[in-house]
Amino acid sequence: MPVKKPAALLRPSVLVELASQATMGVALGLTFSLILITTPVFGVSGLIAFGSNPYDIMQMLAFTCALTFGLGATLTAVVFKLTEDS
């Protein structure tokens, strides 16, 4: 009877690596949203100021960028882990 090996993505070292990739993605997303909001060339701060509640709009933009970048970095790390030669 063959020995059942644990799933490659459930090892603690892999989970720590995926968590670090997610953290890196969130940090990049927050940096991107900060640059997007504070740089007047893009005009995003003017559009946010026209909204009914600018603080909530700014928070939602930062949260969306952080979530998107974090999820993208994590899924990229999963693909690299699954396709890496062991």
Image (tube, rainbow, N blue to C red):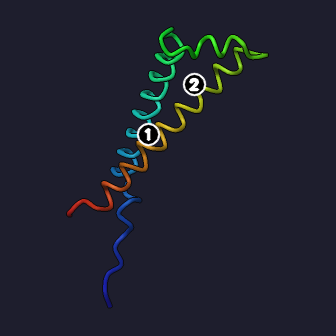
Q: Position of residue 27 (x, y in %)?
A: 44, 27
**Quarter that holds the C terminus:** bottom left
What residue is at 55 percent from the left and 14 percent from the top?
Answer: 43
Residue type, numbered disc 1: Ala
In the rendered view, does 57 fall on the left or right side of 52?
left
Q: Which residue is mark 1?
A: 22
Does 10 sit above or below residue 53?
A: below
As displayed, is residue 76 above or below residue 54? below
User: In the rendered image, which quarter is residue 51 located in?
Assistant: top right
Nearer the viewer's eye, disc 1 or disc 2? 2
50 or 10, which is in the foreground?
Answer: 50
Alpha-carbon distance for marks 1 and 2?
A: 16 Å
Q: Residue at x 42, y 28 (%)?
A: 28
Q: Position of residue 26 (x, y in %)?
A: 47, 32
Q: Where is 7 relative to 69, above or below? A: below
Q: Quadrant of residue 1?
A: bottom left
Tell me the crowding category of disc 1: few under 14, some 14 to 19, or many 20 or more residues within 10 angstroms, Cα based.
Answer: many
Farthest residue toward the bottom? 1
Indicate the position of residue 60 as horizontal and vertical percent values.
Answer: 65, 27
Residue 75: numbered disc = none
Point out residue 30 in the picture as x, y percentages from the top left corner. 49, 24
Work out whether 43 lies above or below 86.
above
Picture quadrant of residue 3: bottom left
Q: Earlier in the sequence, mark 1 or mark 2?
A: 1
Query: Which residue occupies 41% across, 42% down?
Result: 73
Nearer the observer, 4 or 70: 70
10 Å crowding of disc 2: few (<14), some (14-19), many (20+): many
Q: Secondary structure at mark 2?
A: helix
Please, what is the three-letter code of the amino acid marked with disc 2? Ala
Secondary structure state at the residue bearing disc 1: helix
Q: Which residue is mark 2?
A: 62
Q: In percent of the image, x 39 and y 33: which residue is there? A: 24
